[in-house]
Image (cartoon, rainbow, N blue to C red):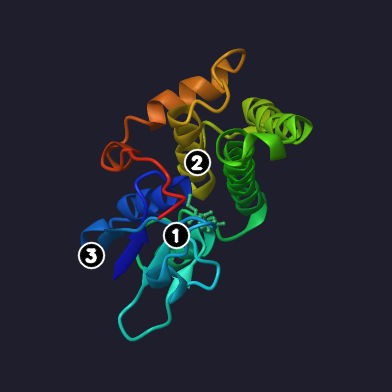
Amino acid sequence: MKLLYQTHSPYARKALVFAHEAGLANGIEVIHQETSPTLRNEEVFAMNPLGKVPVLVRPRLAPIFESDVICAYFDTLHSGRKMIPESGEARWHALQVQAIAQGICDAGIFVRWETLRRPENLRYPPLTDGYLAKVTTSFDWLERHLDVESAMHIGHIAIATALSWVEFRALADFRTRRPRLVKWFDEFEKRPSMQATPLSGETHDAA
Ligand SMILES: N[C@@H](CCC(=O)N[C@@H](CS)C(=O)NCC(=O)O)C(=O)O
């Protein structure tokens, strides 16, 4: 299998960390791709009509895109404990936490567009503030609700890769007043799956 990847994408890293945790990483060739809504990447569009990474390219089977779907597929490929709990409240909590992580990254990318990339005269600061508030309110939700004691699940991987990216891009401070979350995150970052997948690089928006 090939994973169309980006070294600065929290979503791509989520899929790759999941693969490491599932013991699948050795069977995956990781191929870096630059993507941007303002710079079309034909190789990625050929596999994913949304033009985004990650994309999992499977021999003789259709490509799979969207990190949630790729992780769900990976979870079917290993014989260990499932990292997406199959039933009960554990399942809904893990998926809820994953959704919060996705929301943090989506809002964070939006903020980067508004603050760094959109021409200055077209920016609208109240929108940036609104999106940043979603990010910081999500940190507070995680401080209260993240199940830091449970066995590792998809939500943990998604949150760790999201927070690591928030820090990498200096988007917002989650460390102040969130000791429970920070303690858990600092421990999680030591895992070999996180150490093997460091973030690096800048987004390329123009040819
Ligand atoms: N919901 C998607 C988000 C993927 C995504 O936004 N990837 C970014 C890289 S961080 C991308 O390829 N963006 C290109 C674009 O928006 O055109 C997922 O979870 O895989």
Q: Where is residue 7 in the image (x, y as percent from the top left)?
A: 34, 46
Look at label 1 and name its amino acid.
Val
In the image, which disc is placed on residue 156? 2
Q: Distance between the residues labelled 3 and 1?
A: 19 Å
Badge 3 residue CB within 8 Å of ligand 1: no
Among all residues in the image, which is located at the extreme top? 177
Q: Nearer the viewer, residue 32 or 59?
A: 32
Of labels 3 and 1, the one closer to you: 1
Q: Name the residue under label 1.
A: 53
Residue drawn where x is 30% and y is 43% of the image: 197
**Horizontal side, residue 50 vs residue 78: left or right:** right
Judge whether 5 appears above or below 126 on screen: below
Q: How far apart are marks 2 and 1 (CA)?
A: 20 Å
Look at label 3 and name its amino acid.
Gly
Q: Name the residue under label 3.
A: 27
Look at label 2 and name its amino acid.
His
SS class, disc 3? helix
Regarding residue 79, the answer to whether it shows in the image is no
Residue drawn where x is 35% and y is 73% of the image: 57
Badge 1 residue CB within 8 Å of ligand 1: yes
User: CB of mark 3 within 8 Å of CB of mark 2?
Assistant: no
Q: How far apart are marks 3 and 2 (CA)?
A: 23 Å
Residue drawn where x is 50% and y is 45% of the image: 158
